[in-house]
Every structure is written in C-alpha cells, then in structure tokens.
Amino acid sequence: MTGGLDYALLIGSAVLLVAVAAVRVSTRVGLPSLLVYLAIGILIGEAGLGIRFDDAELTRTLGFCALIVIIAEGGLTARWSTLRPVLGLASSLATVGVAVSIAVVGLVVHVLLDLPWPLALLYGAVLSSTDAAAVFATLRRLRLPPRLVATLEAESGMNDAPVVLLVVLLSADLSQMHPWWHELLILTYELAAGAAIGYAVGAAGRWLLRNAALPSAGLYPIAAVGLTVLAYAGGAVAHASGFLAVYVAGVVLGNGRIPHRRAILGFADGLAWVAQIGLFVLLGLLSSPDRLDEALVPALVAGVALVLLARPLSVVIAAVLARPLRGPRRPGNRVGWRGSAFLSWAGLRGAVPIVLATIPLSAGTPGAEGLFDAVFVLVIIFTLVQASTLGPAARMLGVTAPGEAAEVRIETAPLERMNADLLQLDVAAGSRLAGVHIDELRLPAGASVTLVVRDGAGFVPGPDTRLRTGDALLIVATAAARDVAERRLRAVSRRGRLARWFGEDGDEDP
C-alpha cells in the first residue's frame, strides 16, 4: 500500500545525501554548490532517470516556501550593528537599483532580441533580484570587510519583495493594469506594510520567547522559525510584502536576547540548507535540457547586459542616492570605487530568478517558456563565472580583509547562559597583528584571548605572548563587549599596536 511512498522516500533520501556530500566536493573544487544541485535535478529528470515533472505552479509554490526559509535564516543571522550602517545603501540597491536593472536589461533585449516591451521588461524584472541563497553561501566563505558583506546580504534579503510584486504585475494582462501612479502607490504600501508587520511580529515574538518558559529547549528553534513564517503569512493576508516581513522579523528576532539563540541559528541554518537543496533540485527537474540550446543566445545577451551594464549602473546610482541617508561622510560611510566595483561584480543570481520565471510560466504569459529557459541557462553560466572569480576579484580590487574576526557558530550551553560569543581571528600574512603582544591588543573588559593555535598546537597565552603570522586566536567576548573588541582587532590588524595614534578606529571600510 505504501509502495509509491517507499520509492519516493528512497529517491528523496538518496538525493539529499548526495547533495550534502556534494557541498564538500564543490567547496574543494571551487564550484558553486547550487550548480551541483541543479545538475542532480536534471540527471533525475526526463533526460536522465526519466522522472517527468512539468508542474510550474507547484514549483512556484514550493519555491516560495523555500525562499521564506532561506530569507528567514539570512535575517536571523544578520547582525544589526553591521546592518545599520549599510541600511541606506542596501535599501537603495533593493529599490532604485532594481528599477535601473529592469530598464537597462529591458531596453537591451528589446533592441537586440526584438522582443515586445512587456516581455523585455519581464526579462529585466526576473533578473533584477540578487539571490539570497547564493550570496549567503558564497560571501560567508570569503574574508571581506563586514560592510561589503552586510550590504550584499541586506540587498539580497530586501530586493525579493519589490521584484516579486513587479514580476506579478508584468505577468498579468496589460489591459487589466491600473495607471502607473496607482501601481506605484500599491507597491509603496506593500513594502511599508510588510516592513511594519515584520517588525511587529519580530518584536512580539522576541518578548514571547523570553517569557514563554517552554518545557523543552528544542521548542525554541521551532517557535522562532514559525514566527518568521507567521510574518510572511500576515503580510500576504494584509496584501503586503511577505518576503520583506520575513526578513525584518528575522533581523528583529536574531538580534534580540532570546533563549537558546545558538540553537535557533543552527536549526535555521539546517532548514535553509534543506530548502536550498530541494529548491535547486526541483528547478533542475522542471527544466527541459532539449530546449536549453535554443535559449543560449537570449541568455548571453541578457546576461551581458545585466552584468556589464545594468548592475554597475544600478550600484553607482544607488550609492549616489543613498549617500545623504548614511550620516556623516566618515571613511567608514563611503563605499569608494573599489567597493562599488566589487558590489557590481558580486550581485549573484541563483534560484530566485528561476523561481520568479515560474510566475509568468504558470500564468500562461506569452513568451514565458523561452524566458524560463533563458534564465535557467543564464544562472548556470554566470553563477559559474561570477562565484568562482569573487575571491580573485576581491584581491585584485584590494577589498579583502584577511585579519577580519570571524564568528564561530557553536552549540555549547555555557556560552549561551553567559550571553557570550566565541570569535576566531587568523593572523594572516600582511596583518599588523604579527609582532603584537596580547596585552597590547587592549581588548575591552568582557573580552579575552583564551587560546592561541600555533603550528598545530594550542596553548593559553599570557599577557606577554607575542603573536606571529599564521597564528589562530579564539576570543571569548560578552555581547556588550563584542563590537568594541572587533573594532579594536580590526584597528590593530591595519596599523599595529599604535593604531590609536594613527587615528584608526577599526570601522568597516571597503
């Protein structure tokens, strides 16, 4: 009686385990794991094992569910102290930058591919959103200034909201559309209401988690993720942006002093991985390899227009418009041409554009099948090119931060009870930390270097321990001291023990 279910579980578990193993392989060879998941979907599809799947509407529904989990995890792990300085730029990229990308890509494909304006603008809208899963998975492996990482992660978390609304709008029958000003008012309401609902759910959920006294620690991660889903549902029911509500609720929850925070983040991270694997495999299953060769030219035209024209222009315009919103023009508040160039190249596309392409496909929009195939090919080609060159591009532009402190995600209860974090710091080649004594770090009260690993051996350092190139440090810091400790470590890594004499304050500066 359960034969069909048994086979489905067999195939599903095998795919999941292969995908998990593929993460390690793809990391070693430098291949983005999302491409491996897409390949798995294609291999088990009609061109491989013969599993036929062509339900675009189901794919869209499941894709939205996966994006909710992925965006929620991005919000929960985002630190407000790092996010706040870049909020103006990220918001500008997620709104004005999206509009610029739609206009530029739409114009190019209209002229070069002779597509009608509605379909051309739909190409631009589908491709204008950076992918949260691709950005989170790729950037967190690189040592970059927190400001750049936070900008890209915040943009990818926020730009899904306006883009989904625009794609739905452009996929509808044009005869049923309202005047442009009416649609603009609706879009503004949906974004503002989505942010408000997300904040309300996050604040209420934070209070509830603190005071609920649940009988089991395992219930707290479930409740936290459930609150982010509630934010999406509340936004959708109120005809607001559910995706923006999810991200805002995640940020509010993740930055609150809630019980079992580490367990919550670990649970959300695991769910996000499952969502990514399932989403990419499903999208690969939906594709038809025999049609992809016809989509190569449109994909290259749209991709080149996006990467070389639309994205750089949107970054420049968004940075100019956001400048007054970012406070005094200190070095830490300026993006600079190097940072702008990296932001332009690091606007990764992944599953989100493919999921968005299923909206016109399920709505029966003319030309939607060719759009889906072109977007699928574009994501494969340009993700392979961009993701594999982010590290060299960062080094070439001089925006790497080899001495940057990196957080270690842990599950130990004692640090949870002490409301403390464990930081890891590598003394890389070129870092001015080399030669500095432990007491010269002048870490704030509440932060201490607890272990130094040198040449594979660990020891507890004393105040007169002198750091060397290649050392790895473990630093315990209370929540109140963490930001000050990170700024101090950044300052010393740049200017050495006399950082304060040189006016170095350790602010993130790309």
Image: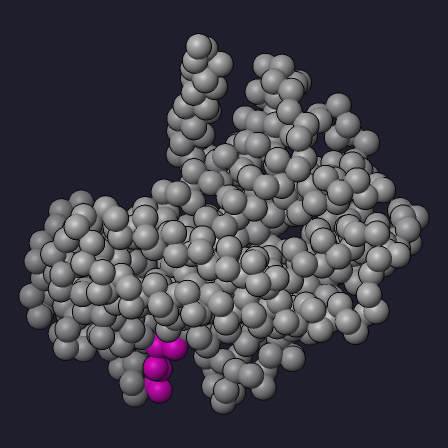
Q: Position of residue 199 (x, y in %)?
A: 44, 69
**Could you tell me which residue is drawn at 57 percent across and 57 percent down?**
236
Observer-nearest residue: 413 or 85? 413
Residue 400 visible in the current orientation: no
Q: Position of residue 247 (x, y in %)?
A: 48, 61
Q: How many marks?
A: 0
Image check: 106 left or right of 207? right
Image check: 246 left or right of 49? left
Which quadrant: the N terminus?
top left
**Could you tell me which residue is drawn at 62 percent across and 41 percent down?**
60
* Figure colour scheme: one colour
Q: Position of residue 200 (x, y in %)?
A: 43, 70
Range covered by the magenta-colored residues: 502-507
Residue 479 visible in the current orientation: yes
- Magenta portion: prevailing SS class: loop
**Could you tell me which residue is drawn at 79 percent across and 40 percent down?**
364
Q: Position of residue 334 (x, y in %)?
A: 53, 79
Does the magenta run of residues contain 365?
A: no
Residue 355 lies in what quarter of the image? top right
**Could you tell me which residue is drawn at 13 percent across and 47 percent down?**
457
Looking at the image, is 492 positioned above or below residue 274? below
Residue 429 lies in what quarter of the image? bottom left
Observer-nearest residue: 387 or 401? 387
